Amino acid sequence: MLLPSFIYNVKGKNDHKHYIYSFFIILFSYVIAGTFLYTVVTSFILSPSSAVSFGLSHLFNICWIAGLWISVEKIHKRPFLTLITNERTFCWPFFYKSFFTVFFLLFLSQLINFSLFPHFYILQHIEWTRFLFFALLSISLVPLQVLSEELFFRGFLLQWWGKVCFSPLWVAICSGLFFGSLHFMNPEMNVSFFLVGFQYVFVGFILSYITVKANRSELAIGAHTANNLFIALFLGDAHSVHGLLPSLFVVEDENAFWSLCLTIFVFLSFYLFSSRYFNRKRAA
């Protein structure tokens, strides 16, 4: 079996020392530069709304992407796009196909959940102008947040771990565990640490495994964007990391086990959808 060139044959300077230097630059950009920028900008805004606070939180993602760009271009001496693909261009068809597939699967899963637990959902009483503002804000900024995470988890880290682990499956497992563990401090973990935690780990693993199998990450970026945007627009939760946003619905309760089952259904279905591309590639 040929190892994916996106993970194991990356151009540029990619010794461990280069990844260590880059890691500290990325960490500095996200934590120090992000905190500084966020503090400066928010100091000029008194009592921001939940939508504005949501938007301002993406300042960290801008700094995160900047740190990744500096690291890849200046330390690894390779194009920034190599964090996504070894091809010369971003594959927009993969992105759109995965986005609309996962968006539809999420819509279907919530219809199923609503049919079983209708009392969990409450339609928010918000002004349509306020919701439209939040929708435009989400459509503009959620892809930025997703891109920063995908560049780091399914790009930088996968390629670094690929230097010590030559099993694509184990690389994806490690990525899923690390991706999931960074969400363990989120307030929604209080619902059920094991079930919600496994949900994060499972999604991280599936997205990483699809990235390895596809030998590029546009499919994962599209799926991740659909997931986060769908939640932001339709499923407000006061116990989420962003607090109660002006989404269409408020989810007041949750069956953690059933939520996990629906997540597995969505992302396993997405994997089967993505495997059509893998099969065509092998046949070619």
Image (spheres, helix red, strand yellow):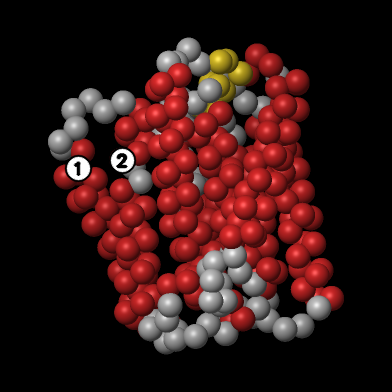
Q: Amino acid at mark 2?
A: Leu
Asked where in the image residue 102 lies, by quadrant, the reply is top right
Q: Residue, x 55% and y 28% (percent of image)? A: 235
Q: 140 or 105: nearer the eye?
A: 140
Q: Residue, x 37% and y 67% (percent of image)? A: 68
SS at mark 1 in the image: helix
Label whose residue precedes the other's in the sequence (1 or 2): 1
Residue 42 in percent (x, y) is at 21, 38
Q: Are marks 1 and 2 in contact (CB under 8 Å)?
A: yes
Per the model, the C-alpha gap separating discs 1 and 2 is 8 Å
Residue 206 placement, left or right of 11 = right
Q: Residues within 10 Å of mark 1 (few under 14, many from 20)?
A: few
Residue 111 placement, left or right of 23 = right
Residue 204 in percent (x, y) is at 60, 55
166 versus 242 height, above or below: below
136 versus 170 height, above or below: above
Residue 200 placement, left or right of 110 = left
Of the 4 image quadrants, the one containing the C terminus is bottom right
Mark 2 = which residue?
Answer: 56
